[in-house]
Amino acid sequence: MNRLLKVFFSILIVFVVAILALYFNGNEHLIKAVKSTYLVGKTGPTIDDYPKFTNRTVNATKPQPFTYRPESFNVKLSAKEEALFLKWETSALFVLKGGDVLFEKYWDAYSDKSLTNSFSMAKSFVSLCVGAAIKEGKVESTEQLISVFLPEYAGSNIRIKDLLQMSSGINFGESYGDPFGFMAKAYYGTNVYDLTLSKKSAKRANVEWKYQGGNSLLLSFIIQKATGKALSDYFAEKFWGPLGAENDALWTIDKQDGRERSYCCFYSNASDFAKVGQLMLDSGRLRGTQLIELEYFKKSVSPVNLPDEFGNLVSHYGYQWWLGKYKGVSFHYARGILGQYIVSVPEWDVVFVRLGKKRDPTRNSIIPSDLLEYFEVVERIKN
């Protein structure tokens, strides 16, 4: 018995020492990661994570349901198409044509009310907020230096535009596999503000495109300082409410009364996400009113035309929106790491949203192969 007690206390001491080491070495986020992810059988962030975190509500103040096209009740997936969506563990597919619902389907236990993680689609929502802040004069323009709002970057030449275009020159780090890296600390940690501002310029701005969530975090800090409002509240006021979202959304924050994890972690459903896609299909206009200026919209969906770290010219990214072509048809879209997509196809007058748990795992793909497979299905449905 004494031997067992000695072993128990030895293990307890090692455990306590390990916990203290994590705290004093700035890696206390790992405690949250292990407890909320690995100990429940997960290997990383999931689409259903919001109960693990503190969230801020994005209020739906003016619900406005979509109408359904008459033919929508007759549209079915083929067995081959059904297999495709099952392969990628799809939770929802929602298709609009002409602003009305053409197709809607949910898988597993998910429904039209399910709140799932947007992941990096949230970056595109941040871009919309920047456009709104410029429209109401809270931010002068995309050419304004970020040091006006973030004096920690005094002396740098970084503009708001450089954050929008992922060309700030700041090396945040974007590895999702590094438990000690920036993204892990931002996702599981409790102080995204200090974490993000601890990163300084490594290169001149406006020289190289490098996709990093830290740029979106800096933009959210600027929005909060410029407007005096939390990012969630500002997005609700300028977009979620006016667009007619039917359900309150959630945006994960780093702690109680904290700041949004603005590079990800906006939780909503396919129908309400589609309302954002319809706004982008309509060039930022809602019922005759520009929610963002037309010029800002055009720049949002224009290629950055900067080289990436490998020297390849980037023509598939704008102001936190992705750009692409399918069979010569141009589209712009928001995308998340597990296959979250809000896609606007102006030539087709179509918006579609796909949500789920898997995506083509190829890193640095210009257009994920699974998205092109969804395009084939939507092309058939819309005809």
Image (spheres, helix red, strand yellow):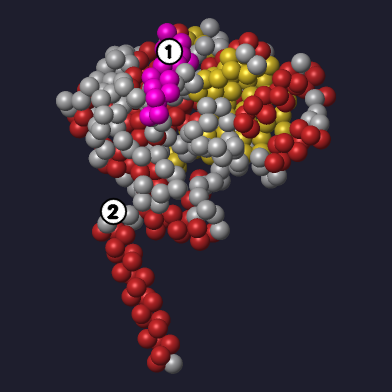
Figure check: 268 above or below 330? below
Q: Is residue 267 visible?
A: no
Q: Residue at x 27, y 17 (%)?
A: 144
Q: Residue at x 49, y 21 (%)?
A: 316
Q: Position of residue 8 (x, y in %)?
A: 40, 81
Q: Quadrant of the C terminus?
A: top right
Q: Residue at x 34, y 24 (%)?
A: 208
Q: Position of residue 98 (x, y in %)?
A: 67, 13
Q: Nearer the viewer, residue 20 or 278?
A: 20
Figure check: 82 above or below 15? above
Report whether 71 appears left or right of 339.
Answer: right
As drawn, the label of residue 355 is none
> Please, what is the dominant secondary structure of the magenta stretch?
loop
The amino acid at mark 2 is Gly
Q: Which residues are magenta?
A: 295-313
Q: Residue at x 75, y 21 (%)?
A: 381
Name the residue furthest bottom: 1
Report whether 188 appears left or right of 246.
Answer: left
CA neighbours of label 2 inside 10 A, class few (<14), some (14 to 19), many (20+)? few
Mark found first going from the N terminus, 1 or 2: 2
Q: Nearer the viewer, residue 225 or 379?
A: 379
Mark 1 sits on what residue? 299
Report whether 265 appears left or right of 382.
Answer: left
Mark 2 sits on what residue? 26
